[in-house]
Image: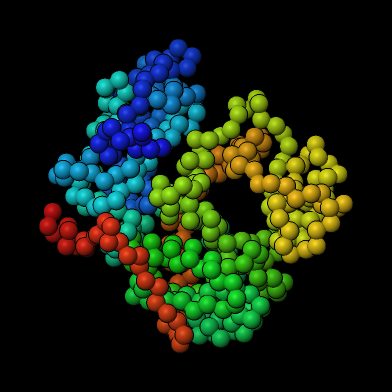
């Protein structure tokens, strides 16, 4: 038998798919087809690296529908190694383009990427990544943050970050270390972080702090890739923003996975999106790449009704469900659980079962807006760029040196005995 994305009958790092004729009678051209993306650059270290393949016909026209999900053969090998521990997956985006993603389980001096159709190489295949090519858990940070940003092709500025940090022209780490726990520490779930010399330290406040694992994970992953600025900050682990003072006087900088037009929290990518990026191809989970290959029914078969499911964690959600019951032709909203408020079935209807994530793509607006936003903003490299730029810009506003304060504990890097990595960027470069 074969697994979902690796076949037991071929070398690891190979995806072999049958060939189907392109839709509409157009002939797929290996020479005209295009390949590009960060997964073709050795310095771009991601949990799952990726690149794009665009099918083009013999007349030079791009396919706008799929030429067949079994159109390509992709093989990734390390020429100097007997075995290559790389998992590969091809995702058909149904618009003539594909995402090829791969997850490495060891570091290599070089990698060779071959993309073919009917035994003919596509575009400039084969591609050689001249290493070292590091895997996700390799602790080999780039010492120069500016060089790392350039390697990752990060934008010079991110509007959301600029907008959020405008409220905080200066940050006093000594002051916030005292005032934020006094103001929120008893009633909310908070993490107080200090990153010092590229090591992560933490102290938690509140009863429910289990979600710290998501913040720990992205900070550790970043610190393995690039030397982080020394920075001290607080993270809100709750489902709603905390800083809601109308006046800009005495507001506190708090990082949150959520925000609103009425709050002043510093917004980060959500914890589940962050986790899906870190775990892409590492376990069965939804992510922004796999979603693009599961877009639901054809456009003409999608419906125009908005859809929502969730628990009762905000009062506004109660009003949303009541609105849905009055206007079911406009919005389909229902609760999957009640925890914070009393359940009145006459007002909110019965509790319903969870639905598949992909069922949301039956709605036209969600499908179109979600696809475009995911492609332009939520790929793995976008998420890493966002976090690093956020901490970099925040660190510039600090008026005092961040400290590892009393009660903080060091957050340890994951044990990587299964696929050990003893490399160091400078050392490996010298050896090469």
| Quadrant of res 256 | bottom right
Colour scheme in use: rainbow
Q: Is residue 68 left or right of residue 245?
A: left
Q: Vertical placement of 224 versus 301: above or below?
A: below
Residue 41 x/y as whole percent: 29, 46
Between 278 and 141, the one lying in front of the other is 278
Residue 10 x/y as whole percent: 27, 33
Q: Is residue 326 left or right of residue 157?
A: right
| Quadrant of res 77 | top left
| Quadrant of res 114 | top left
Q: Vertical placement of 49 versus 159: above or below?
A: above
> Which residue is rendered at x = 17% and y = 58% of the image?
428
> Which residue is rendered at x = 36% and y = 52% of the image?
46
> Which residue is rendered at x = 42% and y = 32% of the image?
98
The reply to whether residue 235 is visible in this rendering is: yes
The reply to whether residue 180 is visible in this rendering is: no
Number of labels in the image equals 0
Q: Is residue 257 left or right of residue 123?
A: right
Q: Residue furthest left?
A: 431
Q: Residue furthest front?
A: 1
Residue 371 x/y as whole percent: 55, 39
Q: Quadrant of the N terminus?
A: top left
Q: Vertical placement of 166 versus 159: above or below?
A: below
Q: Quadrant of the C terminus?
A: bottom left
> Which residue is rendered at x = 36% and y = 34% of the image?
2
Residue 118 x/y as whole percent: 30, 20
């Amino acid at each position: 038998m074969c697994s979902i994305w690796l076949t037991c009958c071929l070398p690891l790092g190979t995806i072999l798919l049958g060939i189907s004729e392109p839709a509409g009678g157009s002939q797929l051209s290996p020479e005209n087809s295009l390949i590009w993306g960060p997964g073709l650059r050795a310095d771009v270290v991601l949990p799952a690296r990726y690149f794009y393949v665009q099918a083009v016909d013999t007349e030079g026209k791009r396919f706008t529908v799929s030429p067949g999900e079994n159109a390509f053969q992709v093989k990734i090998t390390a020429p100097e190694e007997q075995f290559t521990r790389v998992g590969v997956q091809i995702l058909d985006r149904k618009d003539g383009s594909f995402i090829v993603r791969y997850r490495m389980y060891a570091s290599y001096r070089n990698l060779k990427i071959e993309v073919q159709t009917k035994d003919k190489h596509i575009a400039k295949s084969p591609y050689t990544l001249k290493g070292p090519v590091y895997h996700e858990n390799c602790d080999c940070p780039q010492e120069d943050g500016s060089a790392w940003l350039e390697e990752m092709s990060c934008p010079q500025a991110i509007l959301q970050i600029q907008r959020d940090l405008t409220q905080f022209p200066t940050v006093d780490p000594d002051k916030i270390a005292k005032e934020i726990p006094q103001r929120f520490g008893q009633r909310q779930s908070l993490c107080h972080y200090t990153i010092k010399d590229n090591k992560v330290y933490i102290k938690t406040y509140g009863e429910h702090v289990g979600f710290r694992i998501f913040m720990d994970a992205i900070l550790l992953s970043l610190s393995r890739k690039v030397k982080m600025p020394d920075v001290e900050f607080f993270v809100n682990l709750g489902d709603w923003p905390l800083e809601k003072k109308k006046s800009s006087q005495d507001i506190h900088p708090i990082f949150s996975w959520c925000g609103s037009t009425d709050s002043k929290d510093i917004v980060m990518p959500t914890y589940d999106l962050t986790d899906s990026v870190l775990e892409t191809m590492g376990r069965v989970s939804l992510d922004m790449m796999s979603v693009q290959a599961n877009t639901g029914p054809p456009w003409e078969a999608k419906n125009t009704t908005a859809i929502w499911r969730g628990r009762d964690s905000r009062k506004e959600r109660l009003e949303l469900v009541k609105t849905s019951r009055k206007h079911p032709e406009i919005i389909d909203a229902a609760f999957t659980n009640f925890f914070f408020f009393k359940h009145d079935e006459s007002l909110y209807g019965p509790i319903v079962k969870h639905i598949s994530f992909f069922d949301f793509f039956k709605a036209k607006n969600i499908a179109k807006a979600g696809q475009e936003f995911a492609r332009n903003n939520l790929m793995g490299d976008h998420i890493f760029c966002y976090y690093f730029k956020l901490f970099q810009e925040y660190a510039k506003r600090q008026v005092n040196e961040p400290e590892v304060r009393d009660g903080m504990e060091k957050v340890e890097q994951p044990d990587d005995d299964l696929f050990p990595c003893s490399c160091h960027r400078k050392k490996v470069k010298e050896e090469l």
